Amino acid sequence: MKRSRGKDAYAVWRIANFKWFILGRFFLTIAVQMQSVIIGWQVYELTKDPLSLGLIGLAEAVPFISMALFAGHVADIVSRRKIILMTTGIYIMCAMLLLALSFNIESIRSFAGVVPLYLIIAVSGVARAFFYPAQAAYMAQIVPRELYPNSSTWNSTVWHIAAVTGPAVGGLVYGFAGVHTAYVTAVSLAALSLFFFGSAKPVPLPAREKNESFLQSLSGGIRFVFGHQVLLGAMALDMFGVLFGGAVALLPVFAAEVLFVGPKGLGLLRAAPAFGAVIMSMFLAYFPPLKKTGYKLLIGITGFGICIIIFAISRNFWLSLFMLAMSGMFDNISVIIRGTILQLCTPDAMRGRVASVNSIFIGSSNELGSFESGLAAKLIGLVPSVIFGGGMTLLVVMITSRFAPKLRKMELRKIR
């Protein structure tokens, strides 16, 4: 039995298109995560203001969420591979602009502050809005339905390996070689991702309703998600849990003023949640959460909230690093469960639009969570704001457990 299960855990890797796609996403994620660390430290060095870090998230979230529904509509009528290639190219352009600005950042700051950096981030937010539904829909098309839990787990695993590598490399290169070399490295890795995405073959778009109007198509994803209680519940739980519990945006402040570890330590702190998520992903690849899935989802987000609270009160770098890694392990349970539900329950012709709705939930929890963290830190202080966020995450779990019994009792094996 164990041998068969181990063999099945790698089944999706026999699909050539999946391998090319995952390699492209791997290198692009490293580049994006590197850039996130670089620009976070750069902005904090220029402003010394935690709210400015929250504004980084807001600068990306507003255009991202504004364009999400239209991006989902486009992903269902335009070649998804073409969208992936175009948006990756736009990201490379944005990274090159950030590199160019870094050579004259002091003179630019004297008359424009950090606004030019926020504007470039906003453009990358638009690109990400189109990239996310296209890649989610494309992956669902190149993988057989029976391998959806397997592909969701490996997609999360590879993403988190990249998310471990990116911040660590970004912080180390920034610390040892400087901001220019760090940006050049990010641009190079993004260019490599474009090669791998280009190596994956296009797949035809699934047939869809011809009578559907533009507005009906635009709102189709919303209507589908809000009519599916389990899918809506999983998205909402993840959104509100991470919205309040996220501390990633404030890590530059913790690294500089609480743990005193500088940009090198910041890279490790940023990488720690993804490192924990990789460990959990490898475990779930062999033991997918098909039974008592709803309970495992609630336990995962509860553990995430507790880890964030302990991180907030820690003054020891290694304890803080461990708590962030544990938070990544718990959070990844919900990531994999939500991703599997999304693949299993969504019709092929609506994958782009439903993925775009999911991206709004994710964008709200990550980017708006960054803004919430920065604003709360400004108003009530750094440590109290993170403790408050972790406590709110636990409250969200209790409310969901009480008022969403279908989600609590959900089992993935019954919707396969």
Image: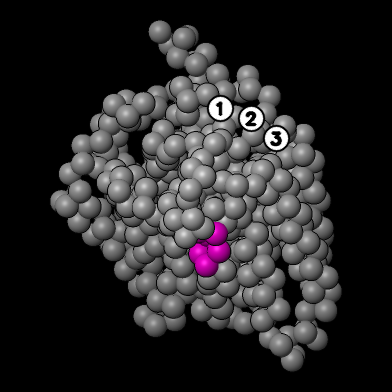
Q: Which mark is residue 18?
A: 2
Residue 39 among those drawn in magenta: no
Instruction: Say whether residue 189 is left or right of residue 249.
Output: right
Q: Secondary structure beneath disc 2?
A: helix
Residue at x 45% of width, y 29% of height: 149
Residue 388 placed where, x, y %? 31, 68
**Residue at the spot 77% in from the left edge and 45% down from the top edge:** 194
Viewer-closest of 412 and 219: 219
Secondary structure beneath label 3 = loop
Element class at badge 1: loop
Which mark, by number, is residue 202?
A: 3
In screen coordinates, is 65 left or right of 94?
A: left
The segment highlighted magenta reads 65-70
Tell us which disc is closer to us: 1 or 3: 3
- Residue 145 drawn at (x, y percent): 47, 25
Mark 3 residue crowding within 10 angstroms, few (<14) / some (14–19) / many (20+): some
Tell me, yes or no, whether the two marked residues, 2 and 3, touch with CB atoms within 8 Å: no
